[in-house]
Image (spheres, coloured by chain):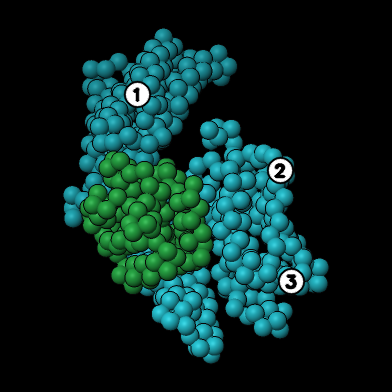
Chain colours: A cyan, B green
Amino acid sequence: MESRTSEALILTHSLLLGERLYLFARLRFLAAAGILIGALFATYVVGIRGLNLLALTGAAVFLAAFNVWVFLSVRPHRRQSDGKASHRRLVWVAHLSILLDYLVLTFAIWSVGGAKSPFLAFYLLHAILSAVLLSRRAAYGLATVGYLLLAGLVLGEWSGAIPRHRPLGAVPGGSEGEFSVVLTVLFVYALLTVLTAVLTTGIVRLLRQNEQGLREASDRLERLADMRRSFLHVVLHDLRSPVGTVVTMLEGLGNGIDGELGEAAKKRVARAGEKLRGVLDLLRGLRVLADLETERLESLMAPVDMLATVRAAVEDQADAAEQRGQRLQIELPATLPSIHGVERLLREAVANYLTNAIKYADPTGPIIVRAAQVGSFVRVEVCDQGPGISVEDQGRLFQEFARVGKSAAQRGKASGIGLGLSIVRRIAEAHDGRAGVVSSAGQGSTFFIELPISPPSSRK
Amino acid sequence: MRDGKHLILCVDDDADLLDLLRMQLEKGGYAVEAAFSAEEGLAKFKQVNPDLLILDLMMEEIDAGTNLVKELKLAGNQAPILLLSSMGDQLNLSTGYRELGLDAVFQKPVNAEALLRTIKAKLTK
């Protein structure tokens, strides 16, 4: 468990490490420029005397130079760590850059007042940065290094081993050389460094643990969703197979394959077949909905010729239309731009419109199937001469299990729209398109689906 | 050909469906050989040299149907192949059935008249 947790932590954390290091590298260039500009400004504008411009320029140049290396090492890995090796490299870069930061900082602080420098607090800033970026141990280690550098500087100055720089106007004067000042600085910064390290690493640890918890929870949910999906697939397939066989058997029976049936028996068998076909349609719809949820949908997409798709869908429904005495009429342009999509699903969408029209339209007028380019979309329409759909029904029509209650029931054809139109809507949405209907009661309906034309890059 | 009739080899793991298919095809004037698995289908193919094949896409394992099509091709099949498929099965296949060069795909439940029409068209070509 322990090893798994730490591994996952690296994974989670490394996603951000490169990004943060990259940000810090850019900030470090600003810091180098800041040292230089600040020193010049302090000397020539504010009038602070005694600043060692040469030393500070040297520090700024050194900082910028090693930062060029940091910047170049981090930039290729900043988006996403490409594995453990690159993560280790990033961690190494982080360690080294913070260490070098401490050295430059100590040098700069020595140049601007040493134990009395107004910039001493920058040690704490670096303690915070290392706590955010690195492991707890590394953060403590680097904070200790920083404190030791500070202590070395202060004690060195006090003992005379290191020369003092006290630029006039930048640091408070007086009480020079008193050991109490040295002790105060050492004590205060020991306390602040420990507090900063403990508090920051504590908070960061908590955040990382939460992140880890969320990640595990989302993994668990993902696995559950996967299981549910494959379970649904198996169940739907296992339900469909026997139901399909029974439908075929009933049809055979009705067609007198085992000897002619009486009129009443024939009717009953036909009714049974019809009812079971409804079940089959429902299972089919559920199957499409399940398919729409698969993550692989994107990978199944390819350029689709909607002309061929519409023709195929119409061909598929020709029998059913004939049985109901409906005429299917196709109006297609010579060419259409291709769609980036899943052919089978798009065909299913058109087929759903067709089966609906065949079921509900009056057989007096033809069912017209049209396709055309409309702006940057391909629009496919199925127009019928049916009873039309009132405006309030149109709103609900594309919801799951919606049914245009009255009009359908009145005509005694309440076998239900069920999933059909909601499937069309979902298919359209999965292709970044939309589905809808234009209709008014008594005027027939035009169901349409609009699909974006594939961008040139995905056209082949 | 067998006894002056075109010979059709049907491969499906659903015995009921196979039985029904056989009766409908025989009623339509064809001779029928049946096999319950892809393996048996391939063996029968080599044995009887059918004029047309009807395969179920989804037998016990995913891809059993499509793999059979590929093996038939390797075995030198020239006869038309009709595929029976449950809607949605294609999405789970590693091969698109278009690439297989099939002569027709029928969605289950199969309309017997349409099937016979297609068979007739394929065999008189």
Residue A361 horizontal side relative to residue B73, left or right: right
Residue A324 % position (x, y): 65, 71
Give the class, few, some or many, for how many residues have Cα within 10 Å of label 1's Cα (few <14, many ≥20): some
Considering the numbered disc 3 on the image, is that residue within a helix, a strand or a loop?
Answer: loop
> Within 10 angstroms of label 2, few (less than 14), some, or many (20 or more) residues?
few
Residue A436 in view of the camera: yes
The relative height of residue B75 versus residue A114 in the rendered view (above or below) is below
The amino acid type found where label 1 is placed reads Ser
Quarter holding residue A67: top left
Q: Residues within 10 Å of mark 3 (few under 14, many from 20)?
A: some
Kindly indicate whether the residues beneath marks 3 and 1 are on one polypeptide chain.
yes
Residue at image coords 27%, 17%: A162
Q: Nearer the viewer, residue A359 or A238?
A: A359
Would you name the residue on which mark 1 appears? A73
Give the mark, 1 or 2, whose residue is nearer the N terminus.
1
Can you name the residue that lies furthest to the front here? B4
Q: CA distance from mark 3 to mark 1?
A: 71 Å
Relative side of A191 to A354, left or right: left
Cα distance between the residues tagged 1 and 2: 56 Å
